[in-house]
Image (cartoon, rainbow, N blue to C red):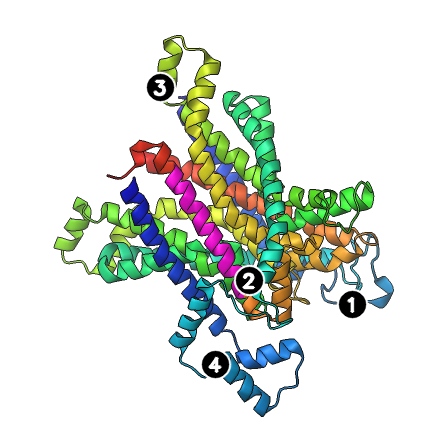
Amino acid sequence: MTKLAARKRAKTKLIVFLILAGLLVLFGILAPLLTPNDPDATSAINMNQAPSRQFPFGTDRYGRCICSRVMMGARTSIFSAVALVAITFVFGTALGMLAGWYGGVVDSVVMRLADVLLAFPQMVLAIAVAGILGGGMGNAMLAMGISGWTGYARLARAKVLERREEAYVCAARLSGCSDLSILLRTLLPNILGPLVVNASTQIGSMMIGIAGLSFLGIGVMEPQAEWGSMISASRAYIQLAPWAVLAPACATILTVMVFNYLGDCVRDVLDVEVAK
Amino acid sequence: MGNYIGKRMLHLVGILIALSFLTFLLMYLTPGDAATKKLNAQGIAVSQEVLDATRKAMGLDRPFLVQYGDWALGVLRGDLGDSYKDGQAVAAKLGKALGYTALLALGSLALSLLVSLPLSVLTALKKDTALDHIVRFFSFVANSLPNFLISVLLMYFLCVKARLLPVVADDSLRGLLLPALALSIPMTGRFLRQFRAEVLEQLSQSYVSGAVSRGVKRRYILWRNVLHNACIPILTVVGLQIGTLFGGSVVIETIFRWPGLGKMAMDAITNRDYPVIQGFVLFTSVVYVLVNLLTDIAYHWVDPRVRPE
């Protein structure tokens, strides 16, 4: 009975945080319609202004509205993290499933590549790649994604190896299904659980990673609004205009927390289902 | 055991070769010509003659694999090439900066362990009490904080608002405090979570209830069995953090101007000083691989059950 209650609680929590995360995504999508001011409009008379009715979170050193920039930054941060997780998820799962299904050379090549990429500390590799490519959102995503797919590939391969000899897979084979059809229709739905858990816990850390690259000046670049680069640029003026740092800082912390908590909830709910 | 170590060593050699190859490839694929980049980094005007001579001197006219082989042999002799910027040997630069990063990494690791070890055991023993919930909440928040944000907030509240510490740190122990704290906060969050899970896992084993029912003192079970068994998985968790520490050091050392490996790497990125970036990536990866190999071997050495025959 208590187990049932605990599961129900975990599910309710998951729904609450799914809604919260959904609201953040929606907020990011609608940001251009909601901003009180033009996020890129500079103004020499409004430099480093304290929060007021016109500028709810004050202005930065170029007189740009912090509130509007934080809102537009939500778009950048959430979009880049979610897109990156989606891309690495699809890419890694596909490679891992192929490796597990076909074995042999495909397996060796994919898994050895994953081994080597995992031998680099992830942020060191990301910083080096982003630094060499010279910044921009696409390059930052590429830098984070280079080793990001390996986790999914390993997991998908292990799960396919575990299930490839199961009766239902043999049945599908005997009934003349193509390899592609078996992989996508028979195996994928059966191994999706742990992969989704992995993906949902990755969103928060990808967000932190991209913000970190932007902070170093090798991720998303000015004038595009992004929380990491806003904090980096405003940090020299922190005595004059602390709001220019604190507003994007709070936004980052809250967003990462919501997505991390969502990841925990997904894990709690799906792990139970998988174990069952 | 000897067999296992032999196998791992063979695997290690493969990984190291692949690591060095990928690192070399990464620099080889950088946009633009290496000779031009070197001359630009030194601020020398580029004419065709100078360019050709530099290219020849750097051996860029040779095939890719020959260049890699030459570079790799140099690496084996401890020669990582020379900095484009100041012509110093990369290995010497790394050696100079290494001490600072090691100090920072060990300092933050010590801070993290000092807090997370006792607290995680305590929260595992007092599972689902108010203390457990509070600590878990804090570890969750700490884990969600990017380290650059912690640094900026620490600087603002401790240096600017409270005026407890100088904003620009010198390389004394006082200067070490803030960067070590900034690195250790997210790490403490992760440690608390993983250590607590380890201890709980051990506490739920049947040997614990068996010992309790035989009347063994709880304190004895905790110290002699539970913590002893949780030790090695904890060591593995710590080993994996070395990679995060190297990545974090780039951010933290740049913010606090701590003259370690991370700051050196970031300066090299700004100056497009490729041999230094290459040296940094190769060095940190090799250390990361070696540390994790050692923890793996320790794991197998202590726990005969996972020892492959």
Q: Are marks 1 and 3 in contact (CB under 8 Å)?
A: no
The amino acid beneath tag 4 is: Leu
Q: Nearer the viewer, mark 1 or mark 2?
A: 2
Distance of label 2 from label 3 (alpha carbons): 51 Å
Give the chain of mark 4: B
Q: What residue is shown with label 3?
A: B207
Same subunit: marks 4 and 1? no
Q: What residue is shown with label 1?
A: A42
- Residue A261 in view in this figure: yes
Q: Are marks 2 and 3 in contact (CB under 8 Å)?
A: no
Give the chain of mark 1: A
Position in image of residue B152 (x %, y %): 71, 49
Position in image of residue A173 (x %, y %): 16, 54
- Residue A25 in view in this figure: no
Q: What residue is shown with label 4?
A: B60
Distance of label 4 from label 3 (alpha carbons): 64 Å
Crowd class of label 4 (few under 14; some 14 to 19; many from 20; radius 10 Å): some
